[in-house]
Image (cartoon, rainbow, N blue to C red):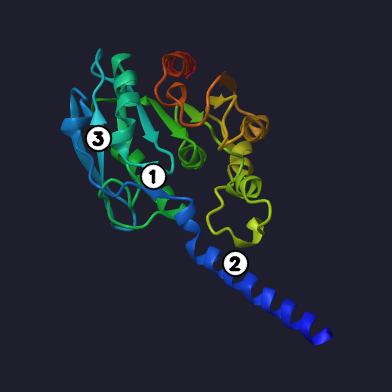
Amino acid sequence: MIRRVTFVLAFLAVIGIAVLTLIWFAQRRLIYFPDTRPPSLDRAGLAATEAVSFVTADGLRLGAWFVGGSGPSLRPTVIIFSGNAGHRGYRAPLAAALQRHGLNVLLTDYRGYGGNPGEPIEEGLAADARAARAFVRSRSDVDQARVVYFGESLGAAVALRLAVEDPPSALVLRSPFASMTLIGQYHYPMLPVGLLLRDRFPSIDRALQLRSPVLIIAGTRDSIIPIDHTRRLYDAIVAPKRFVELAADHNDAALLDGDEMVEAIVRFVATSSNVN
């Protein structure tokens, strides 16, 4: 009997180790869901838009779209850091909505997304964000005193990290999480996420370092990033901040390019520009 119990326990331990090993090596497939196809600018339906590219510090050339706003020759510019799925073509409606309000928009794609080379990892996405900011800094049609970072979901962690390193005039975070560790523990409570996770995106640890005005937009019905997780990050921010709630789930239209969200962003950009 004792031998049988010992054998069963040993067998279960081997299975458990095998499962954890598989998760260790495959975990990034559970975090990043890139559409690797190059998006079509023609199909995106964006006016006054250039296909551009820039090179990261580790030598990757990344494709992006620069969407020109209207109005004065020097305009505020929003750099969009997308979530963990798709490619920049999926964010074209948001860019078009911001463009209609006179804003320039840089629609970026991370490494491994939208035909870009490389594989997405946390440090790689940080390098991609720095390269995007450097590109915007090189543009003569950008008001460099009014550069805004917009990050959604995973992209909110990317935008927040860049905002600590290279502060924008305003930071907009849509459906941000406090850390990947905490959100992983929420979705996978039976797994030792804290031990296994390789890409941690610890936004809450960086929140105290933010100095730019911050607008956070969250869905009250968000099933992927529950609003309590977003509020935990919001509460840790000491910079000027505002919280906007929308009655929506994570991928509802209201949180993708809805009028209420766009208007909140435009008002916040205008107010932040006046302050700064």
Q: Which mark is residue 178?
A: none
Near mark 2 (Cα within 10 A), the count class, few <14, some 14-19 or many ≥20, is some
Q: Spatial distance from mark 1 to mark 2, Cα to Cα?
A: 33 Å
Task: Identify the residue at the far bottom of this view.
Answer: 3
Disc 2 on helix, strand or loop? helix
Q: Quadrant of residue 109?
A: top left
Can residue 229 be spotted in the picture? yes
Q: Which mark is residue 20?
A: 2
Q: Is residue 161 above or below residue 50?
A: below
Q: Nearer the viewer, mark 1 or mark 2?
A: 2
Q: Which comes before the other along the chain, label 1 or label 2?
A: 2
Q: Amino acid at mark 3?
A: Trp
Residue at horizontal 45 percent and vertical 31 percent from the top: 168
User: Left or right of 180: which side holds 8?
Assistant: right
Q: Nearer the viewer, mark 3 or mark 2?
A: 2
Q: Position of residue 193 (x, y in %)?
A: 63, 56
Q: In this figure, which residue is indicated by the disc labeled 1?
A: 130
- Residue at the image position 48 percent from the left and 18 percent from the top: 272
